[in-house]
Image (cartoon, grey):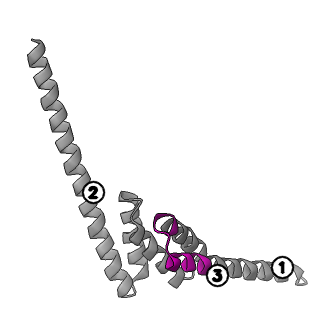
Amino acid sequence: MDRRHTNIKRITMGLITVIMLVSILSCTNRAEKLYEQGEYYYKTGLLDEAIIKFKATTQIEPKHSSAHHFLALAFMRKEWYDYALVEAEITFDLKPTSEIYELVQLARSKAEEKEELRNRLLNNRLELPN
């Protein structure tokens, strides 16, 4: 009885391992397909669609540095600098290169400029007479 129980455990663990591997491979393939679609949309200028695909890629594969990089670039093109900065920093954490560092610095600079402009506009509005 003990031997039979041990064999059943081994078979069960083997099946669980196979199921997990198939699941992981399926997710990786799905993430790559989404990434490729995002890349196509980005290159054709369909930024909203690209962002959706890259975001989906990073949800499946959070360490997909290329998807985070393209998200940062897409956000920069849309002038959504706060979002671009977040994605550029994630990319730098995953893949610290001088190119990505420059992207982080540019996104930070643009985000700060936009914030300063927003504050100046708000201050001017508050100073206008009624």
Mark 2 Cα-neighbour bin, 10 Å: few <14, some 14–19, many ≥20: some
* Furthest-bottom residue in this view: 44
- Magenta stretch in the rendered image: 92-107
Residue 115 seen in this snapshot: yes
Q: Amino acid at mark 2?
A: Cys
Q: Amino acid at mark 1?
A: Asn
Q: Circle 3 sits in a helix, a strand or a loop, which is it?
A: helix
Rendering quarter of residue 63: bottom left
Residue in the image at 45% along x and 69% along y: 68
3D distance between C-alphas at marks 1 and 2: 49 Å
Residue 53 position, x and y percent, is: 36, 70
What residue is pinned by disc 2? 27
What residue is pinned by disc 3? 110
Rendering quarter of residue 45: bottom left
Q: Circle 1 sits in a helix, a strand or a loop, which is it?
A: helix
Mark 3 Cα-neighbour bin, 10 Å: few <14, some 14–19, many ≥20: some
